[in-house]
Image: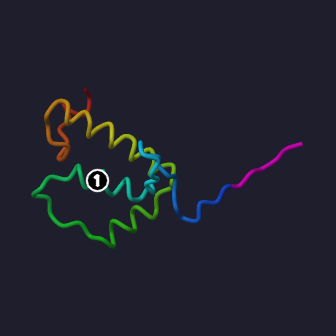
Amino acid sequence: MSEIVVHRTDGEGLPIRARRGIVEPIDVRVTRLLGLALPADAGPVSQIGFDAQLGAMAAASKAALASDLACYLCLCEDIRVAPLPAEPENLVR
């Protein structure tokens, strides 16, 4: 006998558990990390375009992006380089 389990998140995405037990929705986490990666002199970002692109991604893809971006930001902090624009030499370390 087989069983299929469906878990609906009602658009919340995959939550990320913080150290203090606070749940950060994945869209918020991706947005926060991208904001940290942008240089101070970056041009404006279209809210409509950003929301459309983020909304088109699957929750698992957003979670993977957030995880990879968090690791990359830590690497950039450790080697003291700006995360964006990314230099090829920094991406292959």
Eyeballing the image, is 11 above or below 75?
Answer: below
Q: Residue furthest top?
A: 93
Magenta-drawn segment: 1-6
Task: Count the labels in the image.
Answer: 1
The answer to which image quadrant residue 71 occupies is top left
Colour mode of the rendering: rainbow
Circle 1 — which element? Answer: helix
Is residue 14 inside the magenta stretch?
no
Eyeballing the image, is 19 above or below 32?
Answer: above
Q: Is residue 38 left or right of residue 58?
A: left
Q: Residue at horizontal 36%, vertical 53%?
A: 30
Q: Quadrant of the N terminus?
A: top right
Q: Quadrant of the C terminus?
A: top left
The picture places residue 88, in percent across and down from the top left corner, at 20, 35
Which residue occupies the foreground of this view, 31 or 16? Answer: 16
Q: Residue at horizontal 25%, vertical 55%?
A: 35
Q: Is residue 32 left or right of residue 81?
A: right
The picture places residue 33, in percent across and down from the top left corner, at 30, 50
The picture places residue 62, in percent across and down from the top left corner, at 44, 51
The picture places residue 53, in percent across and down from the top left corner, at 39, 63
Which residue occupies the foreground of this view, 21 or 62? Answer: 21
Q: Is residue 10 left or right of residue 56?
A: right
Is residue 3 inside the magenta stretch?
yes
User: Taken as a whole, is the magenta stretch helix, strand or loop?
Assistant: loop
Q: Residue furthest right?
A: 1
Which residue occupies the foreground of this view, 93 or 79? Answer: 79
Query: Mark 1 is on which residue type?
Result: Leu
On the image, numbered disc 1 is attached to which residue?
34
The answer to which image quadrant residue 64 occupies is top left
Q: Residue at horizontal 40%, vertical 46%?
A: 65
Q: Is residue 23 left or right of residue 81?
A: right
